[in-house]
Image (spheres, rainbow, N blue to C red):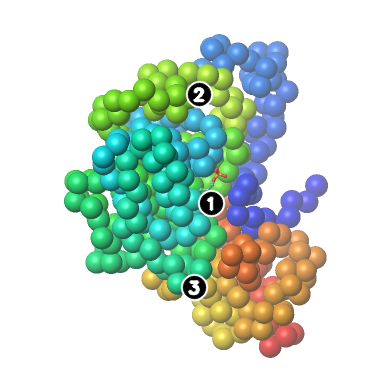
Amino acid sequence: MSRVINFNAGPAGLPLPALERARDEFIEFGKSGMSIMEHSHRGKDYEGVHNEAIALLKELLAVPATHEVLFMQGGAHLQFSTIPLNFLPPGKTADYVITGNWANVAASEAKKLGALGVGKVNVAGNTEVEKKFTRVPTQAELKLTPDATYVHTTSNNTIFGTQFQAFPDTGAVPHICDMSSDILSRKLDVSKFGMIYAGAQKNIGPSGVTVVIVKKDALARCTRPIPSMLDYRIHVKKESLYNTPSTVGIFVIEQVLQWIQDEGGLSAIHARNEDKAARLYAELDRTAFWRPHANPDSRSRMNVTWRIHNPDLEAVFIKEATAVGLNGLKGHRDVGGLRASIYNACPTESVDALIAFMKDFEKRNG
Ligand code: PMP
């Protein structure tokens, strides 16, 4: 089998060594006579996988002892409701910074819960112009509520291709951040966040698992009864085994995290991601044939978005690129044009192959 070059936004390409390790143990885990999927989630074999995946995440992200790492389900979407249910009591306000579709959904899901007695949502910043987002806000633009219970941001806007290069300063107010599309792509000071969450299907592993990193002292502030599956305190107490987790998902996550470590950890991954993105943006800036979507200071290192000066050529570009094995380059319908998602597992050679194709395409159509 020859693997195609995969620029999908998520689920996205996974590192081949991680897939190979998962394959080797797929039918029989260790010498246990069965697949990991067939083991009890309460048994010793699975326990080893579960604990190792959590330990690797803690190590790679240098998670301080003040924070807990959880595996949950329901994707980032379920976190959009779980967060206000846990952390936004009646009479209080949470600040939301709107930088793209996902930030918008996070805020509107929180607003909906007003009907169930959850506190108020305040939009503390919004960079939307004519239904598009080309940048993240500056610190000076934010109108933060001094006594908010949290500030919610989205670190990387998968659809628009923008990313916070420096996170907003939320002062003493806990910062909750959706890192679905850039977690593990760069070094991070976890201690600055009240909570971080991410659907796994970009840089962590397969879909079906959501990683949550939550500060333990934040949990004490939740005093209301909420459904057990949505209660962080229960997941912390039960060490992410309150109910049956996605055991096979967490098993593949363990392989992906091991691969990151083998590659040299987040310093090495970060340097590679900066280099890959710099190569692609240099091509986009080389000629007016391409029209990069994001403002230079907000450019995402994970999702690179652009148009072609003549939009009629975009469908031709996608068709020809697919024919030569460059997959997943169609932009999201809200931006149009093209998008290359160049997550951790995307090798530099794949980015170089895309750039070579782009140069040739311009020559033939410029
Ligand atoms: N937030 C961001 C930044 C995303 O990119 C996505 C999915 N692409 C989501 C949230 C929604 O994730 P899920 O499908 O896991 O609910």
Residue bearing the label numbered 3: 130
Q: In which quadrant of the rendered view does residue 254 lie?
A: top right
Q: In front: 108, or 193?
A: 108
Mark 3 crowdedness (10 Å alpha carbons): few <14, some 14-19, many ≥20: few
Residue type beneath disc 3: Glu
Give me the disc on residue 276: none
Q: Secondary structure at mark 3?
A: loop
Residue bearing the label numbered 1: 344
Query: Along the horizontal axis of the image, is 339 left or right of 169?
Result: right
In the image, residue 148 above or below residue 29: below
In the image, residue 60 above or below residue 137: above
Quarter the C terminus occupies: bottom right
Give me the disc on residue 50: 2
Query: Along the horizontal axis of the image, is 32 left or right of 144?
Result: right
Residue at (28, 62) in percent of width and height: 142
Residue type beneath disc 1: Asn
Residue at (29, 25) in percent of width and height: 223
Across and down, in percent, residue 292 comes to 53, 75
Residue type beneath disc 2: His
Q: Specify which label sits upstream in the sequence, 1 or 2.
A: 2
Q: In which quadrant of the rendered view does residue 332 lie?
A: bottom right
Across and down, in percent, residue 274 comes to 45, 62
Residue at (44, 67) in percent of width and height: 128
Q: Nearer the viewer, mark 3 or mark 2?
A: 3
